[in-house]
Amino acid sequence: MSAAQKKKKKTYSTILTVVFIALVCYFVISFIGLQTDVKAQKEEIAQINAQVNTQIADNRELNKLLNDSELDDYVERIAREELGYVFPDERVYYDEQVVDN
């Protein structure tokens, strides 16, 4: 082989090596990015599953209330305590004296 052919072959080999290294770096960086995305998605799925379990528990409680014979008592208690409702013919008395202990 002549010197020109050896130089051409060495340059070709160097270019292939650089391209190969660049491809390997690209794939490694892409793989790391994908792993980060997968981890974030798993965390999001865990949060959503926790919300689903909470909602299922709330639904069970509400279904129990619907099927329970004490539904009227529950509705009345919520209306009185949280909404301040009273019956039309009912008188409500408030104790305005504050007792200091």
Image (cartoon, rainbow, N blue to C red):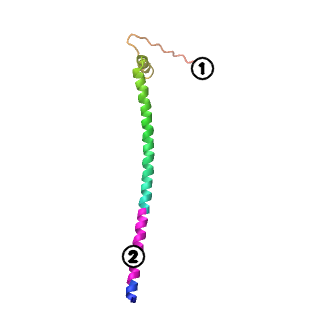
Q: Earlier in the sequence, mark 1 or mark 2?
A: 2
The count of marks equals 2
Q: Is residue 64 above or below residue 11?
A: above
* Residue located 43% across and 30% down the image: 58
Pointer 1 residue: 100
Circle 1: is it few (<14), some (14-19), or many (20+) Cα within 10 Å? few
Q: Quadrant of the N terminus?
A: bottom left
Q: Is residue 69 above or below residue 47?
A: above
Looking at the picture, how far across and down is residue 18, in whole percent? 41, 73
Circle 2: is it few (<14), some (14-19), or many (20+) Cα within 10 Å? few
Element under disc 2: helix
Q: Which mark is residue 78?
A: none
Q: Quadrant of the C terminus?
A: top right
* Residue located 42% across and 48% down the image: 41
Give the residue type that dot 2 points to: Ile
Looking at the picture, how far across and down is residue 88, in whole percent? 37, 12
* Label 1, label 2: how far apart the Cα atoms are: 89 Å
Q: Is residue 12 magenta?
A: yes
Give the residue type that dot 1 points to: Asp
Element under disc 1: loop
Q: Give residue 56's quadrant in the image.
A: top left
Looking at the picture, how far across and down is residue 84, in whole percent? 42, 20
Q: Give residue 69's quadrant in the image.
A: top left
Q: Nearer the viewer, residue 93 or 43?
A: 43
Q: Residue furthest front?
A: 1
Looking at the picture, how far across and down is residue 62, in whole percent? 41, 26
Q: Is residue 76 above or below residue 59?
A: above
* Residue located 43% across and 70% down the image: 21
* Residue located 43% across and 37% down the image: 51
Q: Over which residues does the magenta segment extend?
A: 8-27
Q: Is residue 2 magenta?
A: no
Pointer 2 residue: 15
